[in-house]
Amino acid sequence: MNCLKVSDPDSQNRIRSWSSSHVDSVGDSNHSRQSMDSNDTWRRIRLQQIFFKAVIDNDLEIAVRCLHHGADVAEEYQPYSQTVLHQSAQKGFLRMTELLLRAGANPNTLDEKSFLPLHYACQEGHFHTVRCLLFFGSMVSIENE
């Protein structure tokens, strides 16, 4: 399924590289169910890695493709149990933040430090991102450390 019209040659190369390097076929019918489950787990983990990198690089096209392939916006990443929304808000990526929220990211998810994405956006002075998070229901009454 091609969800994006990509005209930029660099984006086309990134997507082509992503598609050929990171998406394997399911395998032939001789694989056991356990092997297929293992392949599915590997694909899910790899998809989440690509998705995380797309978010921190503010690459909307790759992030959208990952979401269409089932990337999970609620996945927590170490070392602080942050979601991609925490990362996007902290960096002030307004369009990425909106994409993640529209894809179902919870604006009220706390990380290990009891920080919301809103706290990071405020701390870094990303006021447009703050407004976006508030529009999507971020709680102003939750205090951090």
Image (spheres, grey):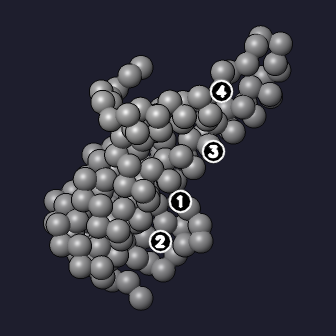
The dot on residue 6 is: none
Q: Quadrant of the N terminus?
A: top left
What residue sits right under mark 2 in the picture?
111
Q: Which residue is drawn at 34% across and 26% down?
A: 3
Q: Percent position (x, y) of residue 17?
A: 54, 34
Q: Which residue in the structure is indicated by mark 3? A: 45
N-terminal of the two: label 4 or label 3?
Answer: 4
For marks 4 and 3, give the one nearer the viewer: 4
Q: How far apart are labels 3 and 2 at the CA level?
A: 20 Å
Amino acid carrying label 3: it is: Ile
Which residue type does callout 2 highlight? Asp
As measured in the structure, the alpha-carbon distance from the residue carrying label 2 to the one carrying label 1 is 8 Å
Q: Nearer the viewer, mark 3 or mark 1?
A: 3
Q: Name the residue under label 1.
A: 76
Q: What residue type is labelled 4?
A: Asp
Marks 2/4: CA–CA distance: 33 Å
Of the image marks 3 and 2, the number of the one nearer the N terminus: 3
Residue drawn at x 34%, y 46% as measured from the top left: 60
Question: Foreground: 39 or 96?
Answer: 96
**Rendered-image quadrant of the C terminus:** bottom left
Question: What secondary structure is found at the residue carrying circle 3?
Answer: helix
Q: Above or below — where is 111 with respect to 8? A: below
- In this figure, which residue is indicated by the disc labeled 4? 24
**Could you classify mark 1 by the number of other residues whose Cα lies within 10 Å: few (under 14), some (14-19), or many (20 or more)?**
some
Q: Earlier in the sequence, mark 2 or mark 1?
A: 1
